[in-house]
Amino acid sequence: MSSTATPSLGPHSAVTLDTLVGYALRRAQLKVFQQLVARLAEFDLRPAQFTAMVIIDNEPGLMQADLARHLAIEPPQLVPLLNKLETRGLAERVRGQQDKRAYGVFLSPAGQALLVQLKALAAESDREATAALNDAERSQLLGLLQKI
Amino acid sequence: MSSTATPSLGPHSAVTLDTLVGYALRRAQLKVFQQLVARLAEFDLRPAQFTAMVIIDNEPGLMQADLARHLAIEPPQLVPLLNKLETRGLAERVRGQQDKRAYGVFLSPAGQALLVQLKALAAESDREATAALNDAERSQLLGLLQKI
DNA sequence: TATTGTTATACTCTATAACTATA
DNA sequence: TATAGTTATAGAGTATAACAATA
């Protein structure tokens, strides 16, 4: 019987989707994100726009290329996103003085004020979507995910 | 100081993206799925096509509407997916005898043989992408995710 | 000549309405 | 008339190439 073992999976390779971390991740991620999307819709915002506001608030004046990198999107995708925030008076592009090609991105006072609300909403949404976990389990999950 | 507490978040509401399960889920899910996409690309297959093959194998002859529901996609999205599997000789639609509107979906012998390889590949990809976890952590993570 | 941001474009994924053929 | 599958279409999300202004 020892000759039937395979080095990668062993003889008991009952591979079902339920045993794969990737599929469990996908289902959980979909649920949590749908919850956030629904909550942010109240403010006519998408998760990426909220995330952009958080990053801009943490690093005011950063350049668009850097913001795009933080968001893990390509620069062209940032253009309509920033346009929307700027049109709504939540953020602004300020042209560089030394380098006139570059634009620093800032939150407006209105944007900063709204962000306070949005952060509370996001935290609440996160807890709602993971209501099946207690606090210990939630931080345990957070730690495991951050290891990946 | 007791008057400064808020019922929803408490006085220490330092909300950053790192404290949200949703963002950790998203990053982890992206990594694991990109790994799977890369491994399946070797066979010119997408994750949804692999998942469809697993479901068909578990429930041979199921109707397309049921398959779409299992995949959490809309029936129109299933059409090109199944067309591709059928063109490549991995699956087949068999028209119902009582109800000629319905089609039962089956894997071909070639599809079943390929699926054995694909399951091993998917399990390996999953372990590679979560190599930062040991077996105990991985099954702990799986349990927490399935609670959500 | 290289770089910042932008436009144009395309490809995938997703969702909905309308069509066909059967019932 | 209702249902299974399909077609057509449109909207997001994502990625690349090409362009304008500036360096």
Image (cartoon, coloured by chain):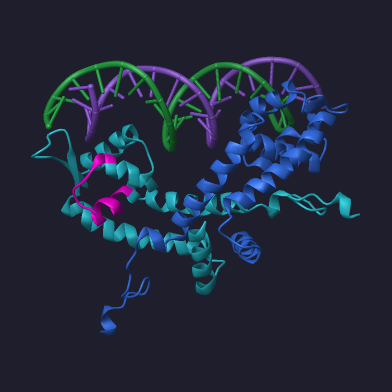
Chain colours: A cyan, B blue, C purple, D green
Q: Is residue B60 magenta?
A: no
Looking at the image, can residue A46 be seen?
Answer: no
Quadrant of res A74: top left
Q: Residue furthest front?
A: A3
Name above or below for residue A54 compared with residue B58. Answer: below
Residue found at x 12% / y 40%: A96
Q: Nearer the viewer, residue A94 or A69?
A: A69
Percent position (x, y) of residue D11?
Answer: 42, 31
Name above or below for residue A119 compared with residue B59. Answer: below
Q: Magenta residues, as a range?
A: A52-65
Quadrant of res B1: bottom left
Q: Residue furthest bottom?
A: B2
Count how many numbered circles sit on residues in the image: 0
Looking at the image, can residue A78 be seen?
Answer: yes
Residue found at x 79% / y 53%: A10
In this image, A28 relative to A108: left or right?
Answer: right
